[in-house]
Image: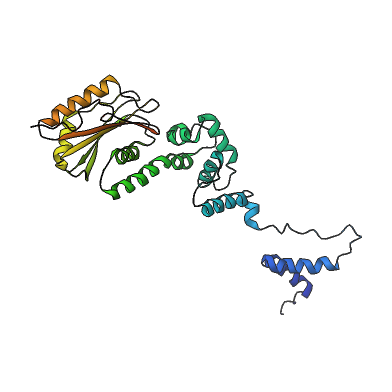
Amino acid sequence: MGRKAKPKEDLRAEEIQYLDPVKKEEEQSELRETASPDTDNVVQFADPEPMEKKVNKNAGHRFRLRTRFREAQGFEGFSDHEILELLLTYGSPRKDTKDLAKRLLDEYGSLKCVFEARPEQLMKMEGVGEMQATLISMALPLARVCSRCEMDNTDQIANRRDLERYCKSLLLGKRVEEFWVICVNARCRFLGRQRISTGSLSEVSAYPRLVMEAVMTYNAHSVFFCHNHPGGTCAPSAEDIASTLQLQKLLRGVDVMVLDHMIIAGDTAYSMAQHGDIEFGARGR
């Protein structure tokens, strides 16, 4: 014998479970209209709020931050914690990042110091994982790359301002001292650069042999030196001046000029040639 067909009402009750949200709401509306308002058996309905907002209640705030960034084409009008908050959203897709951003700023004192912190330092704070720490630590290196690309496209260091910008592009946000040599031709067109050494927070060694190798590699007519003073002033120490004069004397022997030595400390810069600390333009004969 064939099975009895289910009553039409039973089929309708089963089908409602699999309807999409729009059709389900229509079905529920029909039931709502037939329900008696003065009884205790009024049908209860699901919250019509979109599912994505239920899953992530912070989605609207994140969307507004992204929209502000796109419309401003940058962080104009953003507070420091909002900048950090927006960055953190890409490493924390389901969490509110406002509190974490504020705690990071309180811990490090400024947005600059947060960006300069090492990933392993950032990860010590509760709520900061590897992805967030890595993303934050990328900010300054990306800025250096952009600045360096701009300088590389100019292809020439024509004046002290160009040199300062170029040196800052190499040393922006560096946590330890680094010494660089920048090689140029007779018209000060860029030939190449080389990091000679990386030191501690308070010292760096300019190895004469490595400087000479860079000069020979790029067949330089002249060179610029630069290094940084993390957490200090840009004024040179006695050792800075002495080592530069030693390198200048060495390069005279191969008929290469030392045009300047720039020291970078944060947003400030010091030119040894401008202040008469080295013999500007001295060349071997």
> Is 157 located above or below residue 284 in the figure?
below
Q: Position of residue 235 (x, y in %)?
A: 34, 25
Taking the view exactly as shown, the residue that stands out farthest to the top is 238
Q: Position of residue 282 (x, y in %)?
A: 16, 31
Taking the view exactly as shown, the residue that stands out farthest to the right is 38
Q: Is residue 164 left or right of residue 206?
A: right
Q: How is the image coloured?
A: rainbow
Q: Is residue 196 left or right of residue 28?
A: left
Q: Is residue 234 visible?
A: yes
Q: Which residue occupies 75% across, 71% down?
A: 12
- 222 or 51, which is in the foreground? 222
Q: Is residue 56 left or right of residue 253?
A: right
Q: Position of residue 111 (x, y in %)?
A: 49, 36
- Quadrant of image for the C terminus: top left
Q: Quadrant of residue 269?
A: top left
- 253 or 145, which is in the foreground? 253
> Is 269 located above or below residue 85 in the figure?
above
Q: Is residue 13 visible?
A: no
Q: Which residue occupies 27% across, 19% down?
A: 238
Q: Is residue 46 left or right of residue 228?
A: right
Taking the view exactly as shown, the residue that stands out farthest to the left is 285
Q: Quadrant of residue 262?
A: top left
Q: Which residue occupies 57% across, 36% down?
A: 102
Report the label total. Answer: 0
Q: Position of residue 190 (x, y in %)?
A: 23, 45
Q: Quadrant of residue 138?
A: top left
